[in-house]
Structures are given as C-alpha cells and as structure tokens.
Amino acid sequence: MMQEHYPLFYTFHFYLFGVIAIASALAFVTRRSPVAAALWLVNTMFSLAAIYVMLDAQFIAAMQVLVYAGAIMVVFLFVVMLLNLGHASEISDAKGKAPVIVAGLIGLILLAELAVISGRVAPEFKVPAGFAQAEMNKYGAVGSVAWPLFNEYLLAFELTSVLLLVAIAGSVVLGRRRDRDAG
C-alpha cells in the first residue's frame, strides 16, 4: 500500500474527490434537465471510483465505472431519450418557491443530524488481522465479492435486476403510447 509513503498526498486527494462527489451529487439533484442530471451523476460515480482506487479497492472501482457509470447510466439516458421529455420548463414539478424552501429545510435538518452523529464517539470496529488477506487467498479478488453476492444477497440481486427490467419495459410502453396519441 503506497498510502504509508505519501499520507498527505492521499489525504488531500481523498478529500478532493469527496468534495467533487458531493458537489456533483448536489448538481445532479438540482438540474431540471434529465440529461444534464444524468451526466452529473456519471461525474459522481467517477469520483467515487477514484476514492475506491485510493482505498486499494481497484476491483470495486472498476465495477463502479463499468456497471454504474457505464451500463446503468446508458440505460437511464436511453429511457430519457425514449420518453422524449421535451424542454425542461415543460416538465417542472415544483411550482413556486414553497417546494424549494421545504427541500432546503429538509436538507438543513439532515445536515444537522449528520453533525450531531459525527460529533459522537463511535465504537471502533476492528477487523481481525489478516482477515481481508485470508478472504483474498480463499476466493480471489472477484470471488470475495461474488461469493456473498450470489449466496447471501442473491434474492436482493435478482429483485434489483427484475426491477430494472420492469422499469425499462414500462418506459418502452410509455414511449409507444405517446407516439400513438400524437399520430
């Protein structure tokens, strides 16, 4: 691990990518255009992948880029283009300033809760020495992630895939219905 040799370098970049991820996530939720929001989400995913690389989780970083920033965002953009949502001013849900004020208050409450929680002393969780290395030796880098995914969390994994499939099918149905109504 190179982090022992350059602690200031890694600390600086960890916080830098953390700030970029938070700023990109805020830009994601404040955009009115779905395409712009999706691109800000891609930027957030790349920042998280950079943090994973600095934490020596290169496999998870690669999966973050391939699965989330790649495949899922392509599906999101495909659905947005399929629905042909039109101009951002036509699809705005929030009318007036009241929803914006309520959302801001909820955000401030959540930040206050986070400050209170982070101020408390949390109990330390210590991983037994050699635990991660034993897992890597037993299953390998991919196997240590795949084994629990396809054993303990198989139901959640399959439900997520079915949910994504239903969302794609629903967007196709909505897109075709809009085309029939227009024609």
Image: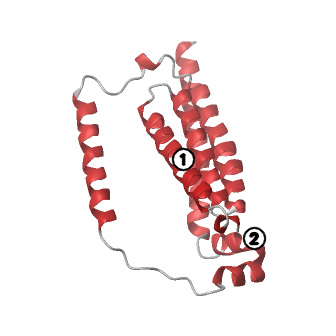
Given residues 133 and 162, the one toward you in this image is 133
Question: On the image, numbered disc 1 is attached to which residue?
Answer: 16
Q: What type is the residue that disc 1 sits on?
A: Leu
| Structure colour scheme | secondary structure
Q: Is residue 56 visible?
A: no
Q: Which residue is drawn at 61% across and 33% down?
A: 77
Q: In which quarter of the image is the N terminus?
A: bottom right
Question: Residue 93: x, y in percent?
Answer: 35, 27
Question: On the image, numbered disc 2 is attached to which residue?
Answer: 141
Q: Residue at x 51, y 82 (%)?
A: 126
Q: How far apart are marks 2 and 1 (CA)?
A: 27 Å
Q: Is residue 134 above or below residue 121?
A: below
- Which of the two marks, 2 or 1, is nearer to us in this view? 1
Which mark is first along the chain, 1 or 2? 1
Q: Is residue 33 visible?
A: yes
Q: What type is the residue that disc 2 sits on?
A: Ala
Question: Residue 92: x, y in percent?
Answer: 38, 23
Given residues 41 and 173, the one toward you in this image is 41
Question: Residue 146: x, y in percent?
Answer: 70, 70
Question: Residue 154: x, y in percent?
Answer: 62, 69
Place residue 14 in its image quadrant. Answer: bottom right
Q: Is mark 2 on a helix, strand or loop?
A: helix
Q: Is residue 111 above or below residue 93?
A: below
Q: Which residue is drawn at 67% across and 65% down?
A: 5
Q: How crowded is mark 1: few (under 14 residues within 10 Å), some or many (20 or more)?
A: some
Relative placement, left or right, of 122 versus 27 is left
Q: What element carries label 1?
A: helix
Q: In which quarter of the image is the C terminus?
A: top right
Given residues 155 and 16, the one toward you in this image is 16
Q: Is residue 136 above or below residue 72?
A: below
Q: Which residue is drawn at 30% across and 65% down?
A: 119
